[in-house]
Image: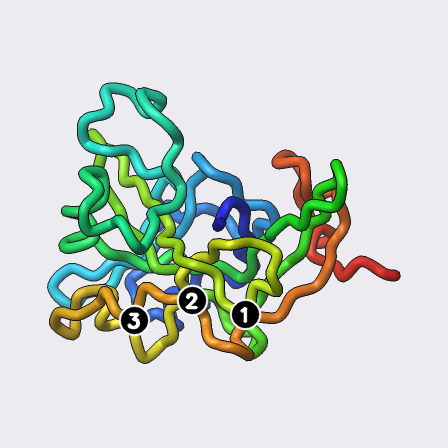
Amino acid sequence: MCGRFTITHPNDALARLFDAVPSNDLPPSPRFNVCPTTPVAVVTSDGGVRRLRPMRWGFIPSWYKTPTDGPLIINARADTVAVKPAFREAVRARRCIVPASGFYEWQAEGKAKLPWYFTRVDGAPLAFAGLWQRWGELDTVAIVSTDAGPGMCGLHHREAVVLEAADWPLWLGEAGHGAAVLMKASGGGVLAAHRVDVAVNSNRAEGAGLIEPLLA
């Protein structure tokens, strides 16, 4: 986790929400099946100036000679980011936020994989904690994950770190040190989930129907 998400909020709305200057080459919205290696909109802060920028979802360590030199890195474990060579510099100096409208998780039932769709209870965009890395001329990002809390309904043992608005300045490096305390599971009552159709199991699927509740 997180391996697939949606972004249905418009880019200009995200820029306003995060008080960020939007790039003119952001990926389009809405997208109902955002997959690894595709571009995503990311919030960064430099000198207190926030920007909404496109990055490749799939962190490429500086020593990779090609993007496929090693495993595809889409998540960074909160418990090891400070010591893993791929992330230890990024977690100090290149923290970011990956906005999402919701995300998918799968429940194993026999040989079947049954998809669930998660959103915030209040309908606001999710703000995933992220780390970014420049590789050549390409900016790349990973989403920070931690041990799952009650909001995951027992569907997975990991979940993406979801930041609350009051914590955005600290995670982005605008409010001093101590951001490590933010790398924790969501509290109770933050996330809501419903079953969706198995059509989303294909990474080529797209469209609003993917997030519609599955009728019993």
Determine whether label 1 and label 2 are within 8 Å by CB: yes
Q: Is residue 67 above or below residue 160?
A: above
**Mark before the other along the chain sequence, 3 or 2:** 3
The secondary structure type at the circle numbered 1 is helix
**Amino acid bearing label 3:** Trp
**Amino acid bearing label 1:** Pro
Residue 196 on image: x %, y %: 74, 54
- How many marks the image carries: the answer is 3
Compared across the picture, whether 122 is left or right of 27 comes to: right
Compared across the picture, whether 84 is left or right of 149 comes to: left
**Label 3, label 2: how far apart the Cα atoms are:** 16 Å
Tell me if mark 1 has few (under 14), some (14-19) or many (20+) residues whose alpha carbon lies within 10 angstroms of its own.
some
Q: Give the residue pinned by disc 2.
A: 185
Q: Is residue 23 visible?
A: no
Residue shown at the point (39%, 72%) measured from the top left: 17
**Amino acid bearing label 2:** Ala
The secondary structure type at the circle numbered 3 is helix
Determine whether label 3 and label 2 are within 8 Å by CB: no
**Mark before the other along the chain sequence, 1 or 2:** 1
Compared across the picture, whether 11 is left or right of 31 comes to: left
Residue 125 on image: x %, y %: 49, 68
Residue shown at the point (73%, 58%) measured from the top left: 195
Residue 15 on image: x %, y %: 37, 65
Q: Give the residue pinned by disc 1.
A: 150
User: Which of the 4 quarters of the picture holds residue 166?
Assistant: bottom left
- Give residue 168's mark: 3
**Mark before the other along the chain sequence, 3 or 1:** 1
